[in-house]
Structures are given as C-alpha cells and as structure tokens.
C-alpha cells in the first residue's frame, strides 16, 4: 500500500490551527467562548484548530478580533 503523503495544504491548515489554539489558550479561552465571541460554531472552531477545515479569510478575521490579535499573527510560520 502507498503511504499517504501530507500535502502542503494539510500542513498549512494544521499550522494555522495550531497557532489559533495556542493564541486561544494564551487568552484563557475555551473553544466555546472563542466560538461565541467570533460568531462561529464551536465544532467549526474545533475543526479549524485540528487542521480539518479550510478557514475563510473573513472567519480568520473574526477569530483574530475575538482573540484581540492581528490576523497576521495567526498566519506566522507559513
């Protein structure tokens, strides 16, 4: 069987998700409170943090505003 190689897309989504999770935890927020503050569904936020969802720019902006950080800080390391 062939091994499934990680695509660059998967790597980028996981990096962004990890950065969002770290920022959320640094603010002492739960996924639920971040979802509420950003107007997004908690399961969507969880999927983004796990790198399973391809986040839209507008949703990234909503999350950044809820975390009170610049959008650019959530894209570091890409």
Image (tube, rainbow, N blue to C red):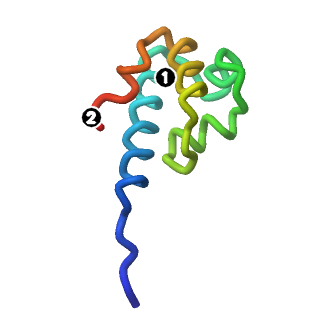
Query: In the figure, 35 relative to 51: above or below?
Result: above
Mark 1 vs mark 2, foreground winner is: 2
Viewport quadrant of the N terminus = bottom left
Between 36 and 13, the residue placed more toward the observer is 13
Mark 1 residue element:
helix
Which of the numbered marks, if any, corresponds to residue 77? 2
x, y percent for residue 76: 30, 29
Neighbours of disc 1 within 10 Å: few (<14), some (14-19), many (20+): many
Residue 42 in which image quadrant = top right
Residue 48 drawn at (x, y percent): 55, 40
Identified at 55% across, 50% down, the residue is 52
Residue 77 coordinates in the image, percent (x, y): 27, 34
Image spot of residue 13 (x, y percent): 44, 45
Q: Residue at 42% of width from left, 18% of height from top?
A: 26
| Quarter of the C terminus within the rendering | top left
Q: Residue furthest front?
A: 57
**Which residue position holds label 1?**
24
Residue at screen point 37% across, 61% down: 7
Instruction: Residue lying at the far bottom in this picture: please name it.
Output: 1
Disc 2 crowd rating (10 Å Cα; few below 14, some 14-19, many 20+) is few
Answer left or right for 37 relative to 77. right
Q: CA distance from mark 1 to mark 2?
A: 17 Å
Disc on the earlier residue, 1 or 2: 1
Rendering quarter of residue 75 = top left
Q: Which is nearer the eye, 26 or 19?
A: 19
């Amino acid at each position: 069987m062939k091994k499934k190689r990680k695509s660059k897309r998967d790597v980028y989504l996981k990096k962004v998700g990890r950065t969002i999770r770290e920022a959320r935890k640094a603010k002492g927020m739960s996924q639920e409170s971040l979802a509420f503050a950003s107007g997004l569904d908690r399961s969507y936020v969880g999927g983004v943090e796990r790198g399973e969802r391809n986040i839209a720019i507008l949703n990234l902006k909503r999350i950044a505003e809820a975390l009170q950080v610049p959008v650019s800080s959530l894209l570091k390391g890409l």
